[in-house]
Amino acid sequence: MTATATPLEDGDTSGPTKRNADDWLADTRTSYDTVADSYADYIRDALAGEPYVRAALVLFADLVHAAGGGPVADVGCGPGHVTAHLHTLGLDAFGVDLSQAMIDVARRDHPGLRFEVGSMTDLHLADASVAALLAFWSLIHIPDDAIPTVLGQFRRVLRPGGPLLLGFHVGDESRLKTQGYGGHPMKVYVHRRQPDQVAAWLREAGFTVKAQMLLDLDQSASGAVLFAHRQP
């Protein structure tokens, strides 16, 4: 489900009605199963044109190395392009994604790296088992009322003091994405959020927010990257 500041497409600007977790998780899984191959083609070389995002990833890698290294979870990894990039930076990175088709593509395109199906609402990882965690443009499909659960999962699996890196769309609206990436049908809400709101959620979940980077400020589809650490 991951992206690198990908644009929103074909959406209703009205916010989502309240649905249970099974509904929106199923819609998200089905949508990304449907677009997996075309999305992988769309995003394959995205990092090459994102120097500031690459710089954020280098800083993230430096923080992990400075803390002694260890497993790094790329949660919402999609086709695995960011996971693979983290590997080139010397990290023991592995990917987790809700979509089986995305995981199949990631395993095909990046053989030798570890990818597994899983939901960020209930990560099948042991407590304090990862040295660092990244969620790049994958929280964008999580409704507000599920964010505390997701961040609680992130905190649970991170080692005390472990770095966390989040990337997301900036704004105040939620839009229903009904098609994308080759014209395939989709049914996912894309939530834009303000960095201050995301930072507040992180603090409430037991993280210390260290830095933020705003991206593409003169474009309609701006983004943000937040660095945080799990509190002891």
Image (cartoon, rainbow, N blue to C red):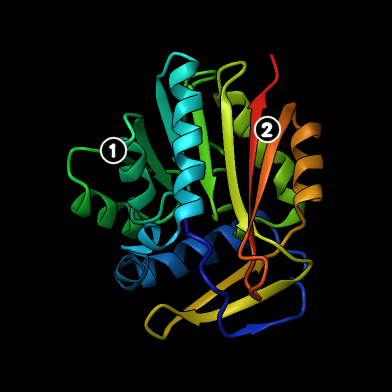
For the point 71% across and 48% down, the residue is 146
Q: Percent x, y for residue 191?
A: 68, 64
For the point 51% across and 39% down, the residue is 134
Instruction: Look at the picture and state if 107 lies above or below 204.
Output: below
* Local crowd size for mark 1, using a 10 Å CA cut-off: few (<14), some (14–19), many (≥20): few
52, 159: nearer the viewer: 52
Q: Quadrant of residue 217?
A: bottom right
Mark identifier at residue 205: none
Q: Amino acid at mark 1?
A: Thr
For the point 58% across and 33% down, the residue is 164
Instruction: Look at the picture and state if 191 lies above or below 220.
Output: above
Per the image, the residue denoted by label 1 is 88
Q: Percent x, y for residue 21?
A: 65, 54
Question: Do the numbered discs 2 and 1 sit on residues whose CB atoms are within 8 Å?
Answer: no
212, 137: nearer the viewer: 212
Per the image, the residue denoted by label 2 is 152
Which quadrant, please, contains the C terminus?
A: top right
